[in-house]
């Protein structure tokens, strides 16, 4: 009798284990897609790409994060999804080092971590879905405005913050190019709008008042760029102060069509969001990615994993299971093509 009971109990436990395995197999993988802020159009469009890719892959993707650009608020978002048992986190960080501890804890719990748009220390993520290396994007900023400025010009840089990873890397390269190739340009100031539309407009207006002979505003930030364009238009300085930078075409289109901005740029942020989720899902599924690998993503194209040092990081950050995945192309918007983009 005892033996019979033991056998029945063992059979019951086995059935429970099988049911648990099947339930786990049927449970969709879950990825948290976290922007710097949820309310800005660039991030909303990237989120659209991320969630669309999730549907395509048959996984759950949640677009969520802070309404203000804050390390502490982003850390809360990461902690929330780690606690909820999500399989991966794809994050655009407001700080190169502020999230180190929370991301390390996430990775120690088996959560896959990738970054997109704005990176963290490579030790605390696997891959960075990169819109372009600092050399590419710093050069792009200068090329978009160079033919609009005189040989001797006064220029200002205006973007989100002094600590954000991506924009500061691009600006460092852009300033080096100015020093080497445009000796007649004077950088009169570098200002920040902290991804706040009202504050950005006020700051841009103050720049124009403080430097009435300014020739150009370079704005590698999706909030600062339209704010600068609006400030130039409000001040009646269209054609006198050139404005360029990075934002979505739908946001800058009115300024381009009114002649306030001649050239603006970006990359396809919808595709960037999609690629971040695609890569995160590869890792969740146990697919090994290493530096030198190439893979094709439907609707995006051929992607390659390159070393972290290509981003300007120290060679000591290079390792096989961590690297950059650079978007295949970047975009320039003009009056001739800005209406053709759907984001």
Image (tube, rainbow, N blue to C red):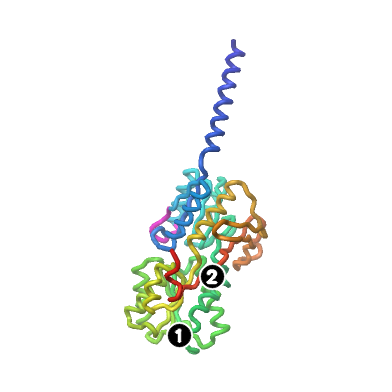
Residue at position x 49%, y 73% from top?
332
The residue at 45%/50% (across/down) is: 62
| Quarter of the image where one finds residue 315 | bottom right
Q: Is residue 216 left or right of residue 26?
A: left
Q: Which quadrant of the rendered structure holds the C terminus?
A: bottom left
- Is residue 189 visible to the viewer in this orientation of the structure? no
Rendered residue at 47%/62% (across/down)? 94
Confirm whether the magenta stretch covers residue 14.
no
Residue 210 placement: quadrant: bottom left
Rendering coords of residue 284 (x, y %): 57, 47
Q: Main secondary structure of the magenta part?
A: loop
Tell me the SS state at disc 2.
helix
Q: With 167 as the anchor, is 212 left or right in this view?
A: left
- Disc 1 + disc 2, Cβ < 8 Å: no
What residue is pinned by disc 1? 154
- Secondary structure, mark 1, is strand
Classify 126 as above or below 188. Answer: above
Can you give x and y, in whole percent of width and height, for residue 41 in the image?
41, 63
Of labels 1 and 2, earlier in sequence is 1
Q: In the rendering, at what x and y percent does residue 3 appear?
A: 62, 13
* Disc 1: CA contacts within 10 A as few (<14), some (14-19) or many (>=20): many
Residue 169: which numbered mark, if any? 2
* Span highlighted in magenta in the image: 64-71
Foreground residue among 121 and 10:
10
């Amino acid at each position: 009798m005892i033996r019979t009971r033991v056998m029945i109990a063992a059979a019951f436990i086995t059935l429970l284990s099988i049911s648990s395995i099947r339930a786990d197999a049927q449970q969709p993988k879950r990825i948290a897609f976290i922007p710097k802020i949820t309310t800005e159009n660039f991030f909303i469009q990237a989120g659209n790409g991320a969630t669309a890719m999730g549907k395509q892959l048959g996984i759950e993707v949640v677009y969520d994060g802070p309404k203000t650009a804050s390390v502490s608020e982003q850390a809360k978002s990461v902690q929330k999804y780690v606690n909820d048992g999500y399989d991966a986190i794809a994050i655009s960080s407001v700080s190169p080092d502020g999230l180190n501890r929370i991301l390390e804890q996430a990775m120690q719990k088996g959560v896959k971590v990738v970054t997109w748009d704005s990176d963290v220390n490579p030790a605390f993520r696997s891959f960075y879905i990169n819109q372009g290396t600092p050399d590419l994007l710093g050069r792009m900023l200068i090329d978009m405005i160079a033919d609009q400025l005189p040989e001797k010009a006064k220029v200002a840089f205006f973007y989100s913050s002094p600590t954000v990873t991506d924009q500061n890397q691009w600006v460092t390269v852009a300033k080096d190019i100015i020093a080497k190739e445009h000796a007649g340009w004077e950088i009169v100031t570098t200002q920040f709008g902290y991804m706040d539309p009202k504050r950005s407009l006020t700051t841009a207006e103050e720049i124009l008042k403080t430097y009435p002979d300014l020739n150009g505003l370079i704005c590698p930030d999706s909030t600062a760029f339209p704010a600068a364009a609006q400030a130039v238009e409000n001040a009646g300085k269209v054609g006198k102060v050139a404005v360029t930078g990075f934002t979505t075409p739908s946001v800058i289109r009115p300024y381009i069509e009114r002649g306030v901005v001649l050239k603006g740029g970006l990359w396809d942020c919808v595709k960037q969001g999609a690629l971040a989720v695609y890569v995160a899902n590869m890792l969740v599924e146990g697919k090994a990615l290493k530096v030198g690998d190439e893979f094709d993503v439907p609707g995006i194209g051929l992607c390659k994993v390159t070393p972290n040092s290509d981003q300007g990081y120290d060679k000591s950050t290079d390792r096989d299971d961590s690297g950059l995945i650079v978007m295949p192309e970047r975009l320039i918007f003009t009056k001739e093509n800005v209406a053709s983009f759907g984001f």
